[in-house]
Image (cartoon, rainbow, N blue to C red):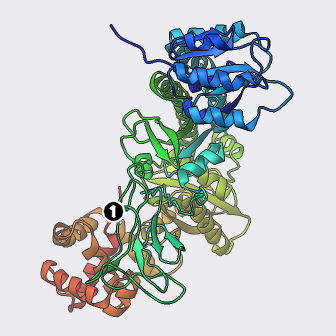
Amino acid sequence: MVTTAAVTLGQLLDLNLLEGYEILGGAGGLRRPVRVVVVGTSVHEISALAPGSVVVFGREQLALDDLAVDLAIRLAAGAGLSGLVAARTVRQVPLVTRRLADRFALPLIGVEDLAPVRVVTAFDPYVRAPEIAGLRVLSDAARRFQRPPANANALTSMLADTLGEPVALVDAESRFVAGNPAVHALLAGEATEAETGAETATRSGAGPATKTGAETATRSGAEAATRSGAGTAAKTGTATAANTATATKTGAETATRSGAETAAKTGAKTATKTATKTGAETASEAETGAELSTSHPVATTVHLRGTDLLLQPVQVDPVGPAVSWIVVRLPASATGVLLEPIRRAVAIAALAFAVRVAGDAVRVEREHRRRSLLLNEIIEQPDDPGRRTVERATALGWRLAGWHTAVHVQVSAAAPAVRLSALGAELEDQVGAALAERGEGWVFWSTTDAEADPGPLARRVAEALAAVEAEHPGLRLCAGLGGAHAGAAGIGRSADQARQAALLARTVRRPATVEHFDAVSTRRLLAAWYGSAPLRGAAADLLAPLREADPSGELIRTLRAYLDCQSSAKAAAVLLGVHRNTVMQRMERVTRLVAANLDDPDDRLAVHLATRAADVDWD
Protein backbone atom coordinates (compact mmCIF):
# COMPACT_ATOMS: atom_id res chain seq x y z
CA MET A 1 0.00 0.00 0.00
CA VAL A 2 1.35 3.41 -1.00
CA THR A 3 0.98 6.11 1.64
CA THR A 4 0.73 9.72 0.52
CA ALA A 5 2.64 12.25 2.60
CA ALA A 6 0.39 14.52 4.64
CA VAL A 7 -0.07 18.14 3.66
CA THR A 8 1.07 20.88 6.06
CA LEU A 9 -0.87 23.93 7.22
CA GLY A 10 1.68 26.15 5.47
CA GLN A 11 0.99 24.38 2.18
CA LEU A 12 -2.75 24.74 2.64
CA LEU A 13 -2.40 28.46 3.23
CA ASP A 14 -0.16 28.82 0.17
CA LEU A 15 -3.02 27.49 -1.96
CA ASN A 16 -4.83 30.81 -1.34
CA LEU A 17 -7.99 29.02 -0.28
CA LEU A 18 -8.56 31.62 2.45
CA GLU A 19 -8.87 35.31 1.64
CA GLY A 20 -7.32 37.85 3.96
CA TYR A 21 -5.86 35.43 6.47
CA GLU A 22 -3.11 36.47 8.86
CA ILE A 23 -0.55 34.34 10.69
CA LEU A 24 -0.68 35.89 14.15
CA GLY A 25 1.78 33.57 15.85
CA GLY A 26 3.33 30.11 15.92
CA ALA A 27 4.77 30.32 12.40
CA GLY A 28 7.38 27.77 13.44
CA GLY A 29 4.69 25.07 13.35
CA LEU A 30 3.46 25.67 9.80
CA ARG A 31 5.28 22.54 8.61
CA ARG A 32 3.41 20.23 10.93
CA PRO A 33 1.35 17.63 9.05
CA VAL A 34 -2.41 18.15 8.99
CA ARG A 35 -4.47 14.98 9.41
CA VAL A 36 -7.94 16.47 9.64
CA VAL A 37 -9.70 19.87 9.72
CA VAL A 38 -12.66 20.15 12.11
CA VAL A 39 -15.16 22.75 13.28
CA GLY A 40 -14.58 23.81 16.88
CA THR A 41 -17.60 23.90 19.17
CA SER A 42 -15.96 24.61 22.51
CA VAL A 43 -12.51 25.46 23.82
CA HIS A 44 -12.75 22.71 26.43
CA GLU A 45 -13.25 20.04 23.74
CA ILE A 46 -9.88 20.80 22.13
CA SER A 47 -8.03 18.30 24.29
CA ALA A 48 -10.25 15.52 22.93
CA LEU A 49 -9.28 16.17 19.29
CA ALA A 50 -6.88 13.87 17.44
CA PRO A 51 -3.23 14.88 17.04
CA GLY A 52 -2.57 16.66 13.75
CA SER A 53 -5.99 18.33 13.72
CA VAL A 54 -6.61 21.93 12.69
CA VAL A 55 -9.59 23.33 14.56
CA VAL A 56 -11.66 26.20 13.11
CA PHE A 57 -13.75 28.38 15.41
CA GLY A 58 -16.54 30.75 14.50
CA ARG A 59 -16.85 34.15 16.15
CA GLU A 60 -19.52 32.84 18.50
CA GLN A 61 -17.35 29.99 19.75
CA LEU A 62 -14.01 31.85 20.01
CA ALA A 63 -12.90 35.33 19.00
CA LEU A 64 -9.23 36.24 18.87
CA ASP A 65 -9.59 38.98 21.47
CA ASP A 66 -11.19 36.53 23.90
CA LEU A 67 -9.24 35.68 27.04
CA ALA A 68 -9.99 32.02 26.31
CA VAL A 69 -7.61 32.10 23.33
CA ASP A 70 -4.62 31.56 25.62
CA LEU A 71 -6.30 28.52 27.12
CA ALA A 72 -7.13 27.22 23.64
CA ILE A 73 -3.47 27.55 22.61
CA ARG A 74 -2.28 25.61 25.66
CA LEU A 75 -4.85 22.85 25.19
CA ALA A 76 -4.12 22.58 21.47
CA ALA A 77 -0.38 22.33 22.09
CA GLY A 78 -0.94 19.65 24.71
CA ALA A 79 -3.14 17.65 22.34
CA GLY A 80 -0.63 17.85 19.48
CA LEU A 81 -2.86 19.91 17.19
CA SER A 82 -1.44 21.47 14.02
CA GLY A 83 -3.17 24.84 14.21
CA LEU A 84 -5.98 27.10 15.39
CA VAL A 85 -8.13 29.21 13.04
CA ALA A 86 -10.39 31.87 14.49
CA ALA A 87 -12.14 35.09 13.49
CA ARG A 88 -10.41 38.45 13.90
CA THR A 89 -12.02 41.39 15.64
CA VAL A 90 -11.46 45.12 15.46
CA ARG A 91 -9.19 44.92 18.48
CA GLN A 92 -5.63 43.74 18.12
CA VAL A 93 -4.62 40.34 19.41
CA PRO A 94 -2.62 40.82 22.63
CA LEU A 95 1.13 40.47 22.25
CA VAL A 96 1.21 37.92 25.06
CA THR A 97 -1.15 35.70 23.07
CA ARG A 98 1.07 35.90 19.98
CA ARG A 99 4.15 35.05 22.02
CA LEU A 100 2.37 32.12 23.61
CA ALA A 101 1.61 30.71 20.16
CA ASP A 102 5.25 31.24 19.19
CA ARG A 103 6.41 29.49 22.34
CA PHE A 104 4.42 26.36 21.53
CA ALA A 105 5.04 26.70 17.76
CA LEU A 106 1.30 26.39 17.30
CA PRO A 107 0.06 28.33 14.24
CA LEU A 108 -2.62 30.86 15.20
CA ILE A 109 -4.45 32.00 12.05
CA GLY A 110 -6.80 34.98 11.98
CA VAL A 111 -9.47 35.15 9.28
CA GLU A 112 -12.44 37.28 8.38
CA ASP A 113 -15.77 36.31 9.86
CA LEU A 114 -16.14 33.20 7.69
CA ALA A 115 -18.36 30.29 8.52
CA PRO A 116 -16.14 27.49 9.93
CA VAL A 117 -17.84 25.00 7.64
CA ARG A 118 -16.58 26.96 4.61
CA VAL A 119 -12.99 26.77 5.85
CA VAL A 120 -13.29 23.04 6.54
CA THR A 121 -14.87 22.47 3.12
CA ALA A 122 -12.05 24.38 1.40
CA PHE A 123 -9.25 22.52 3.20
CA ASP A 124 -10.69 19.03 3.52
CA PRO A 125 -10.15 17.74 -0.07
CA TYR A 126 -6.48 18.66 0.06
CA VAL A 127 -6.03 17.12 3.50
CA ARG A 128 -7.62 13.85 2.43
CA ALA A 129 -5.77 13.74 -0.91
CA PRO A 130 -2.84 16.22 -1.00
CA GLU A 131 -2.14 15.38 -4.61
CA ILE A 132 -5.29 17.31 -5.52
CA ALA A 133 -3.39 20.53 -4.87
CA GLY A 134 -0.77 19.42 -7.35
CA LEU A 135 -3.39 18.51 -9.93
CA ARG A 136 -4.88 21.96 -9.50
CA VAL A 137 -1.54 23.61 -10.30
CA LEU A 138 -0.92 21.30 -13.25
CA SER A 139 -4.40 21.86 -14.63
CA ASP A 140 -3.98 25.62 -14.40
CA ALA A 141 -0.57 25.43 -16.12
CA ALA A 142 -1.91 23.23 -18.92
CA ARG A 143 -4.80 25.65 -19.49
CA ARG A 144 -2.67 28.78 -19.49
CA PHE A 145 0.09 27.38 -21.71
CA GLN A 146 -2.06 25.69 -24.35
CA ARG A 147 -0.61 28.29 -26.67
CA PRO A 148 2.99 29.47 -26.47
CA PRO A 149 3.41 32.78 -24.61
CA ALA A 150 3.86 35.76 -26.88
CA ASN A 151 7.18 36.78 -25.34
CA ALA A 152 9.38 36.50 -22.26
CA ASN A 153 7.29 38.96 -20.25
CA ALA A 154 4.13 37.00 -20.99
CA LEU A 155 5.85 33.77 -19.90
CA THR A 156 6.93 35.09 -16.52
CA SER A 157 3.61 36.83 -15.89
CA MET A 158 1.51 33.76 -16.74
CA LEU A 159 3.69 31.42 -14.71
CA ALA A 160 3.72 33.76 -11.69
CA ASP A 161 -0.10 33.85 -11.80
CA THR A 162 -0.22 30.06 -12.04
CA LEU A 163 2.11 29.39 -9.10
CA GLY A 164 1.39 32.46 -7.01
CA GLU A 165 5.15 32.95 -6.68
CA PRO A 166 7.62 35.40 -8.29
CA VAL A 167 9.31 34.22 -11.49
CA ALA A 168 12.24 35.48 -13.55
CA LEU A 169 13.75 34.49 -16.88
CA VAL A 170 17.53 34.62 -17.32
CA ASP A 171 19.78 33.74 -20.21
CA ALA A 172 22.48 31.07 -20.22
CA GLU A 173 24.97 33.57 -18.75
CA SER A 174 22.57 34.32 -15.85
CA ARG A 175 21.65 37.79 -17.13
CA PHE A 176 18.16 39.11 -16.40
CA VAL A 177 15.71 38.86 -19.31
CA ALA A 178 12.20 39.31 -17.88
CA GLY A 179 10.04 38.83 -14.81
CA ASN A 180 10.76 39.69 -11.19
CA PRO A 181 14.15 41.41 -10.72
CA ALA A 182 14.26 40.38 -7.05
CA VAL A 183 14.40 36.71 -8.05
CA HIS A 184 17.29 37.42 -10.39
CA ALA A 185 19.00 39.35 -7.60
CA LEU A 186 18.83 36.26 -5.41
CA LEU A 187 20.35 34.17 -8.17
CA ALA A 188 23.03 36.75 -8.90
CA GLY A 189 23.93 37.18 -5.25
CA GLU A 190 22.89 40.80 -4.96
CA ALA A 191 21.38 40.39 -1.50
CA THR A 192 22.49 42.75 1.22
CA GLU A 193 24.65 42.10 4.23
CA ALA A 194 23.14 39.74 6.79
CA GLU A 195 21.77 41.11 10.07
CA THR A 196 24.43 39.30 12.05
CA GLY A 197 27.04 41.57 10.53
CA ALA A 198 28.48 38.76 8.43
CA GLU A 199 28.74 39.12 4.71
CA THR A 200 27.50 36.57 2.26
CA ALA A 201 29.38 36.58 -1.00
CA THR A 202 27.46 35.06 -3.87
CA ARG A 203 28.59 34.92 -7.44
CA SER A 204 26.70 33.30 -10.31
CA GLY A 205 27.46 33.33 -14.08
CA ALA A 206 30.09 31.48 -15.97
CA GLY A 207 31.44 29.83 -12.77
CA PRO A 208 29.79 31.29 -9.64
CA ALA A 209 30.98 30.82 -6.11
CA THR A 210 28.52 31.20 -3.26
CA LYS A 211 29.42 31.57 0.35
CA THR A 212 26.75 31.68 2.99
CA GLY A 213 27.82 32.86 6.35
CA ALA A 214 31.19 34.48 6.90
CA GLU A 215 34.68 33.95 8.10
CA THR A 216 34.82 35.73 11.45
CA ALA A 217 37.46 36.38 13.98
CA THR A 218 36.86 37.69 17.50
CA ARG A 219 39.28 39.78 19.45
CA SER A 220 39.67 40.51 23.14
CA GLY A 221 38.01 43.77 24.00
CA ALA A 222 34.63 42.60 22.69
CA GLU A 223 34.91 44.02 19.16
CA ALA A 224 34.47 41.50 16.33
CA ALA A 225 35.75 41.96 12.81
CA THR A 226 34.13 40.02 10.03
CA ARG A 227 35.25 39.46 6.48
CA SER A 228 34.03 37.21 3.67
CA GLY A 229 36.41 35.26 1.53
CA ALA A 230 39.55 36.33 3.37
CA GLY A 231 41.23 35.73 6.67
CA THR A 232 40.78 38.11 9.59
CA ALA A 233 43.11 38.98 12.37
CA ALA A 234 42.29 41.11 15.34
CA LYS A 235 43.52 44.66 15.88
CA THR A 236 46.22 45.50 18.46
CA GLY A 237 45.87 42.63 20.81
CA THR A 238 45.36 38.92 20.53
CA ALA A 239 42.98 37.43 18.02
CA THR A 240 41.43 34.03 18.25
CA ALA A 241 39.22 32.55 15.61
CA ALA A 242 35.71 31.61 16.59
CA ASN A 243 33.61 28.51 15.95
CA THR A 244 34.91 26.13 13.32
CA ALA A 245 38.47 27.18 12.50
CA THR A 246 41.27 28.93 14.36
CA ALA A 247 43.72 31.47 13.12
CA THR A 248 46.96 29.79 12.29
CA LYS A 249 50.41 31.16 11.76
CA THR A 250 53.83 29.60 11.24
CA GLY A 251 55.06 28.71 14.70
CA ALA A 252 52.10 30.27 16.53
CA GLU A 253 48.37 29.90 17.05
CA THR A 254 47.65 33.59 17.37
CA ALA A 255 47.96 36.36 14.85
CA THR A 256 48.58 39.89 15.94
CA ARG A 257 49.05 43.15 14.24
CA SER A 258 48.89 46.91 14.78
CA GLY A 259 47.01 49.44 12.72
CA ALA A 260 43.55 49.97 11.41
CA GLU A 261 43.33 47.23 8.77
CA THR A 262 43.44 43.44 9.09
CA ALA A 263 46.08 41.66 7.08
CA ALA A 264 47.24 38.11 6.72
CA LYS A 265 50.99 37.74 7.17
CA THR A 266 53.28 35.43 5.22
CA GLY A 267 52.55 31.88 6.28
CA ALA A 268 49.44 32.87 8.25
CA LYS A 269 45.83 32.11 7.48
CA THR A 270 43.00 33.29 9.62
CA ALA A 271 39.71 31.74 8.78
CA THR A 272 36.55 31.19 10.73
CA LYS A 273 33.53 29.83 9.02
CA THR A 274 30.20 30.18 10.77
CA ALA A 275 28.49 28.67 7.76
CA THR A 276 28.14 24.99 7.01
CA LYS A 277 30.84 25.21 4.37
CA THR A 278 34.23 25.05 6.12
CA GLY A 279 37.53 25.16 4.29
CA ALA A 280 36.02 25.46 0.82
CA GLU A 281 35.92 28.42 -1.51
CA THR A 282 32.71 27.43 -3.21
CA ALA A 283 29.47 26.43 -1.55
CA SER A 284 27.54 23.25 -2.18
CA GLU A 285 24.83 25.15 -3.98
CA ALA A 286 27.26 27.51 -5.66
CA GLU A 287 27.60 25.73 -8.97
CA THR A 288 24.68 27.82 -10.24
CA GLY A 289 26.54 29.50 -13.07
CA ALA A 290 28.09 26.23 -14.21
CA GLU A 291 24.65 24.62 -14.17
CA LEU A 292 23.24 27.40 -16.35
CA SER A 293 26.00 27.14 -18.93
CA THR A 294 26.24 23.34 -19.04
CA SER A 295 25.74 21.55 -22.33
CA HIS A 296 23.41 19.02 -20.64
CA PRO A 297 21.04 21.15 -18.57
CA VAL A 298 18.58 19.62 -16.12
CA ALA A 299 16.01 21.14 -13.79
CA THR A 300 17.39 21.65 -10.32
CA THR A 301 16.71 23.34 -7.00
CA VAL A 302 19.35 25.51 -5.34
CA HIS A 303 19.37 27.06 -1.89
CA LEU A 304 20.65 30.63 -1.84
CA ARG A 305 20.32 33.18 0.93
CA GLY A 306 17.90 31.01 2.86
CA THR A 307 15.63 30.74 -0.19
CA ASP A 308 14.94 27.79 -2.48
CA LEU A 309 15.06 28.58 -6.20
CA LEU A 310 13.82 26.21 -8.88
CA LEU A 311 15.85 26.43 -12.11
CA GLN A 312 14.19 25.05 -15.22
CA PRO A 313 16.04 25.04 -18.57
CA VAL A 314 14.35 26.18 -21.77
CA GLN A 315 15.74 24.01 -24.57
CA VAL A 316 14.97 24.41 -28.24
CA ASP A 317 17.09 21.34 -28.92
CA PRO A 318 16.25 18.55 -26.42
CA VAL A 319 19.88 17.37 -26.40
CA GLY A 320 21.45 20.83 -26.67
CA PRO A 321 22.23 23.60 -24.18
CA ALA A 322 19.56 25.79 -22.64
CA VAL A 323 18.78 29.03 -24.46
CA SER A 324 17.41 30.48 -21.21
CA TRP A 325 16.35 29.46 -17.70
CA ILE A 326 13.14 29.94 -15.75
CA VAL A 327 13.84 30.80 -12.11
CA VAL A 328 11.04 30.38 -9.56
CA ARG A 329 11.27 31.36 -5.92
CA LEU A 330 9.75 28.44 -4.06
CA PRO A 331 7.70 28.99 -0.91
CA ALA A 332 8.87 27.27 2.26
CA SER A 333 5.87 24.96 2.01
CA ALA A 334 6.83 23.68 -1.46
CA THR A 335 8.01 20.30 -0.22
CA GLY A 336 6.93 16.72 -0.48
CA VAL A 337 3.77 16.08 -2.42
CA LEU A 338 3.39 19.72 -3.51
CA LEU A 339 6.89 20.19 -4.95
CA GLU A 340 6.70 17.78 -7.89
CA PRO A 341 3.55 19.35 -9.41
CA ILE A 342 5.25 22.76 -9.27
CA ARG A 343 8.25 21.31 -11.11
CA ARG A 344 5.99 19.82 -13.75
CA ALA A 345 4.03 23.03 -14.15
CA VAL A 346 7.25 24.97 -14.70
CA ALA A 347 8.38 22.30 -17.19
CA ILE A 348 5.11 22.80 -19.11
CA ALA A 349 5.78 26.54 -19.24
CA ALA A 350 9.36 25.93 -20.37
CA LEU A 351 8.21 23.66 -23.19
CA ALA A 352 5.62 26.19 -24.34
CA PHE A 353 8.21 28.97 -24.37
CA ALA A 354 10.69 26.73 -26.21
CA VAL A 355 8.07 26.31 -28.93
CA ARG A 356 7.81 30.09 -29.17
CA VAL A 357 11.59 30.52 -29.32
CA ALA A 358 11.92 27.78 -31.95
CA GLY A 359 9.16 29.34 -34.04
CA ASP A 360 10.82 32.74 -33.88
CA ALA A 361 14.17 31.18 -34.82
CA VAL A 362 12.62 29.44 -37.84
CA ARG A 363 11.07 32.70 -39.02
CA VAL A 364 14.35 34.56 -38.62
CA GLU A 365 16.31 31.84 -40.42
CA ARG A 366 13.74 31.73 -43.21
CA GLU A 367 14.05 35.50 -43.65
CA HIS A 368 17.84 35.35 -43.63
CA ARG A 369 17.79 32.54 -46.18
CA ARG A 370 15.47 34.57 -48.39
CA ARG A 371 17.84 37.52 -48.18
CA SER A 372 20.81 35.25 -48.89
CA LEU A 373 19.16 33.91 -52.06
CA LEU A 374 18.34 37.44 -53.15
CA LEU A 375 21.93 38.54 -52.59
CA ASN A 376 23.17 35.61 -54.68
CA GLU A 377 20.82 36.63 -57.49
CA ILE A 378 22.17 40.18 -57.41
CA ILE A 379 25.80 39.01 -57.42
CA GLU A 380 25.29 36.39 -60.15
CA GLN A 381 23.29 38.69 -62.45
CA PRO A 382 24.64 42.18 -61.75
CA ASP A 383 24.02 43.51 -65.28
CA ASP A 384 20.41 42.32 -65.55
CA PRO A 385 19.01 41.59 -62.08
CA GLY A 386 15.43 41.29 -63.28
CA ARG A 387 12.31 43.20 -62.28
CA ARG A 388 11.33 40.82 -59.47
CA THR A 389 14.83 40.95 -58.00
CA VAL A 390 14.82 44.74 -58.03
CA GLU A 391 11.39 44.83 -56.37
CA ARG A 392 12.48 42.47 -53.58
CA ALA A 393 15.70 44.41 -53.02
CA THR A 394 13.76 47.67 -52.85
CA ALA A 395 11.38 46.16 -50.29
CA LEU A 396 14.36 45.36 -48.05
CA GLY A 397 15.79 48.84 -48.46
CA TRP A 398 18.67 47.64 -50.64
CA ARG A 399 19.84 50.12 -53.25
CA LEU A 400 21.36 48.67 -56.42
CA ALA A 401 22.51 51.99 -57.87
CA GLY A 402 25.24 54.10 -56.30
CA TRP A 403 28.53 53.34 -54.58
CA HIS A 404 28.45 50.23 -52.38
CA THR A 405 30.70 49.33 -49.43
CA ALA A 406 30.05 45.79 -48.21
CA VAL A 407 30.57 44.58 -44.64
CA HIS A 408 31.15 40.92 -43.80
CA VAL A 409 30.64 39.98 -40.12
CA GLN A 410 31.91 36.72 -38.66
CA VAL A 411 31.98 34.97 -35.28
CA SER A 412 35.53 34.31 -34.09
CA ALA A 413 34.57 32.59 -30.84
CA ALA A 414 31.32 31.90 -29.01
CA ALA A 415 29.90 29.86 -26.14
CA PRO A 416 27.75 26.82 -27.08
CA ALA A 417 24.61 28.49 -25.72
CA VAL A 418 24.85 31.42 -28.17
CA ARG A 419 22.36 31.06 -31.02
CA LEU A 420 23.55 32.44 -34.35
CA SER A 421 20.02 33.30 -35.46
CA ALA A 422 19.60 35.48 -32.38
CA LEU A 423 23.00 37.09 -33.00
CA GLY A 424 21.91 38.05 -36.50
CA ALA A 425 18.84 39.81 -35.15
CA GLU A 426 20.92 41.65 -32.53
CA LEU A 427 23.43 42.75 -35.15
CA GLU A 428 20.63 44.07 -37.34
CA ASP A 429 19.33 46.16 -34.44
CA GLN A 430 22.79 47.56 -33.77
CA VAL A 431 23.87 48.37 -37.33
CA GLY A 432 20.40 49.40 -38.51
CA ALA A 433 20.58 47.41 -41.74
CA ALA A 434 19.13 44.18 -43.15
CA LEU A 435 21.70 41.37 -42.96
CA ALA A 436 21.97 38.44 -45.34
CA GLU A 437 23.59 35.15 -44.40
CA ARG A 438 26.59 34.44 -46.58
CA GLY A 439 29.14 31.71 -46.05
CA GLU A 440 30.25 31.72 -42.45
CA GLY A 441 28.69 35.03 -41.43
CA TRP A 442 26.45 37.93 -42.43
CA VAL A 443 26.74 40.53 -45.15
CA PHE A 444 25.23 43.97 -45.57
CA TRP A 445 26.33 47.05 -47.46
CA SER A 446 26.14 50.79 -47.23
CA THR A 447 25.23 52.76 -50.34
CA THR A 448 26.12 56.38 -51.10
CA ASP A 449 25.67 58.57 -54.14
CA ALA A 450 29.42 59.15 -54.39
CA GLU A 451 32.53 57.36 -53.18
CA ALA A 452 32.70 58.03 -49.42
CA ASP A 453 35.23 57.81 -46.59
CA PRO A 454 34.91 54.30 -45.04
CA GLY A 455 35.99 55.57 -41.59
CA PRO A 456 32.51 56.40 -40.20
CA LEU A 457 31.12 53.05 -41.39
CA ALA A 458 34.05 51.18 -39.84
CA ARG A 459 33.48 52.94 -36.50
CA ARG A 460 29.76 52.24 -36.61
CA VAL A 461 30.39 48.55 -37.27
CA ALA A 462 32.99 48.36 -34.47
CA GLU A 463 30.54 49.93 -32.00
CA ALA A 464 27.82 47.51 -33.07
CA LEU A 465 30.11 44.49 -32.63
CA ALA A 466 31.23 45.73 -29.21
CA ALA A 467 27.62 46.21 -28.09
CA VAL A 468 26.67 42.66 -29.06
CA GLU A 469 29.83 41.21 -27.52
CA ALA A 470 29.04 42.97 -24.24
CA GLU A 471 25.77 41.04 -24.03
CA HIS A 472 27.47 37.64 -24.45
CA PRO A 473 30.58 36.92 -22.36
CA GLY A 474 33.11 34.91 -24.33
CA LEU A 475 31.72 36.03 -27.69
CA ARG A 476 34.20 37.54 -30.12
CA LEU A 477 33.04 39.11 -33.39
CA CYS A 478 35.01 40.54 -36.27
CA ALA A 479 34.19 42.24 -39.52
CA GLY A 480 35.77 43.13 -42.84
CA LEU A 481 34.98 46.13 -45.04
CA GLY A 482 35.35 45.92 -48.80
CA GLY A 483 36.25 48.78 -51.06
CA ALA A 484 33.63 51.12 -52.53
CA HIS A 485 32.36 49.99 -55.97
CA ALA A 486 29.64 51.40 -58.21
CA GLY A 487 26.51 49.72 -59.55
CA ALA A 488 24.91 46.35 -58.87
CA ALA A 489 28.09 44.60 -59.97
CA GLY A 490 29.98 46.54 -57.33
CA ILE A 491 28.02 44.81 -54.55
CA GLY A 492 29.59 41.44 -55.40
CA ARG A 493 33.09 42.87 -55.78
CA SER A 494 32.89 44.71 -52.47
CA ALA A 495 31.42 41.63 -50.74
CA ASP A 496 34.35 39.46 -51.89
CA GLN A 497 36.82 42.02 -50.60
CA ALA A 498 34.92 42.29 -47.31
CA ARG A 499 35.21 38.54 -46.85
CA GLN A 500 38.99 38.67 -47.37
CA ALA A 501 39.24 41.52 -44.87
CA ALA A 502 37.17 39.47 -42.40
CA LEU A 503 39.72 36.66 -42.69
CA LEU A 504 42.37 39.12 -41.55
CA ALA A 505 40.18 40.32 -38.71
CA ARG A 506 39.79 36.76 -37.41
CA THR A 507 43.54 36.53 -36.83
CA VAL A 508 43.51 39.57 -34.52
CA ARG A 509 42.74 38.56 -30.96
CA ARG A 510 41.02 41.66 -29.70
CA PRO A 511 37.33 42.48 -29.27
CA ALA A 512 35.23 43.90 -32.10
CA THR A 513 38.02 43.86 -34.71
CA VAL A 514 37.24 45.59 -38.00
CA GLU A 515 39.63 45.42 -40.96
CA HIS A 516 39.34 47.43 -44.18
CA PHE A 517 40.41 45.82 -47.43
CA ASP A 518 41.88 49.03 -48.85
CA ALA A 519 43.86 49.90 -45.69
CA VAL A 520 47.26 48.77 -46.97
CA SER A 521 48.34 46.57 -49.82
CA THR A 522 50.31 44.23 -47.54
CA ARG A 523 47.10 43.32 -45.75
CA ARG A 524 45.68 42.12 -49.06
CA LEU A 525 48.63 39.79 -49.40
CA LEU A 526 47.92 38.37 -45.95
CA ALA A 527 44.23 38.01 -46.79
CA ALA A 528 45.12 35.88 -49.81
CA TRP A 529 47.44 33.76 -47.64
CA TYR A 530 44.84 33.20 -44.92
CA GLY A 531 42.25 32.38 -47.56
CA SER A 532 44.32 29.46 -48.86
CA ALA A 533 43.30 26.17 -47.23
CA PRO A 534 46.56 24.33 -48.21
CA LEU A 535 48.69 27.06 -46.63
CA ARG A 536 46.60 27.01 -43.47
CA GLY A 537 47.04 23.23 -43.36
CA ALA A 538 50.81 23.63 -43.61
CA ALA A 539 50.71 26.16 -40.79
CA ALA A 540 48.75 23.72 -38.61
CA ASP A 541 51.32 20.99 -39.28
CA LEU A 542 54.13 23.35 -38.33
CA LEU A 543 52.55 24.05 -34.93
CA ALA A 544 51.34 20.50 -34.31
CA PRO A 545 54.25 19.61 -31.93
CA LEU A 546 53.36 22.60 -29.75
CA ARG A 547 49.69 21.56 -29.63
CA GLU A 548 50.62 18.02 -28.63
CA ALA A 549 52.99 19.18 -25.90
CA ASP A 550 50.59 21.83 -24.59
CA PRO A 551 46.89 21.27 -25.39
CA SER A 552 46.02 24.43 -23.44
CA GLY A 553 47.61 26.54 -26.19
CA GLU A 554 49.83 28.58 -23.86
CA LEU A 555 52.97 27.81 -25.86
CA ILE A 556 51.42 28.97 -29.14
CA ARG A 557 50.02 32.13 -27.55
CA THR A 558 53.39 32.88 -25.99
CA LEU A 559 55.18 32.30 -29.30
CA ARG A 560 52.82 34.65 -31.12
CA ALA A 561 53.17 37.37 -28.48
CA TYR A 562 56.95 36.97 -28.56
CA LEU A 563 57.07 37.39 -32.35
CA ASP A 564 54.48 40.21 -32.29
CA CYS A 565 56.78 42.05 -29.88
CA GLN A 566 59.83 41.76 -32.16
CA SER A 567 61.29 38.88 -30.11
CA SER A 568 61.22 40.89 -26.88
CA ALA A 569 60.59 38.64 -23.88
CA LYS A 570 59.96 41.67 -21.66
CA ALA A 571 57.31 43.17 -23.95
CA ALA A 572 55.69 39.76 -24.48
CA ALA A 573 55.52 39.25 -20.70
CA VAL A 574 53.68 42.56 -20.31
CA LEU A 575 51.29 41.61 -23.11
CA LEU A 576 50.59 38.18 -21.60
CA GLY A 577 50.49 39.37 -18.01
CA VAL A 578 53.24 37.00 -16.85
CA HIS A 579 56.82 37.30 -15.62
CA ARG A 580 59.63 37.73 -18.14
CA ASN A 581 61.26 34.51 -16.93
CA THR A 582 58.04 32.63 -17.70
CA VAL A 583 58.18 33.82 -21.31
CA MET A 584 61.83 32.81 -21.62
CA GLN A 585 61.16 29.34 -20.17
CA ARG A 586 58.27 28.81 -22.57
CA MET A 587 60.33 29.98 -25.52
CA GLU A 588 63.04 27.48 -24.63
CA ARG A 589 60.44 24.72 -24.88
CA VAL A 590 59.18 26.16 -28.17
CA THR A 591 62.60 26.17 -29.80
CA ARG A 592 63.08 22.53 -28.80
CA LEU A 593 59.69 21.45 -30.15
CA VAL A 594 59.08 23.45 -33.34
CA ALA A 595 60.79 22.38 -36.54
CA ALA A 596 62.00 25.84 -37.45
CA ASN A 597 64.92 28.14 -36.70
CA LEU A 598 63.57 31.38 -35.27
CA ASP A 599 66.88 33.10 -36.04
CA ASP A 600 66.28 32.50 -39.74
CA PRO A 601 64.11 35.30 -41.27
CA ASP A 602 62.16 32.94 -43.55
CA ASP A 603 61.44 30.44 -40.77
CA ARG A 604 60.53 33.21 -38.35
CA LEU A 605 58.06 34.72 -40.88
CA ALA A 606 56.45 31.34 -41.57
CA VAL A 607 56.08 30.59 -37.85
CA HIS A 608 54.71 34.06 -37.18
CA LEU A 609 52.05 33.69 -39.87
CA ALA A 610 51.20 30.22 -38.58
CA THR A 611 50.63 31.51 -35.03
CA ARG A 612 48.30 34.20 -36.34
CA ALA A 613 46.23 31.61 -38.17
CA ALA A 614 46.10 29.28 -35.16
CA ASP A 615 42.94 28.84 -33.10
CA VAL A 616 40.78 30.37 -35.82
CA ASP A 617 37.84 28.26 -36.98
CA TRP A 618 38.14 28.88 -40.70
CA ASP A 619 35.26 26.57 -41.58
Q: How many marks?
A: 1
Closest to the observer, 114 or 612: 114
Q: Residue at x 57, y 49 (%)?
A: 186
Residue 241 occupies quadrant:
bottom left
The quadrant the N terminus occupies is top left
Which structural element holds mark 1? loop
Label 1 Cα crowd, 10 Å radius (few <14 / some 14-19 / many 20+): few
| x then y, percent, for residue 233 | 44, 78
| x then y, percent, for residue 250 | 27, 83
| x then y, percent, for residue 283 | 40, 54
Closest to the observer, 236 or 183: 236
Mark 1 residue type: Gly
In this rendering, the answer to whether 170 lies above or below 547 is above
In this rendering, the answer to whether 149 lies above or below 549 is above
Disc 1 designates what residue? 279
Q: Residue at x 54, y 22 (%)?
A: 78
Closest to the observer, 410 or 265: 265
In this rendering, the answer to whether 384 lies above or below 585 is above
Residue 352 visible, this orientation: yes
Q: Residue at x 28, y 86 (%)?
A: 583
Residue 383 visible, this orientation: no
Q: Residue at x 44, y 53 (%)?
A: 440
Residue 74 occupies quadrant:
top right
Q: Is residue 96 left or right of residue 473?
A: right
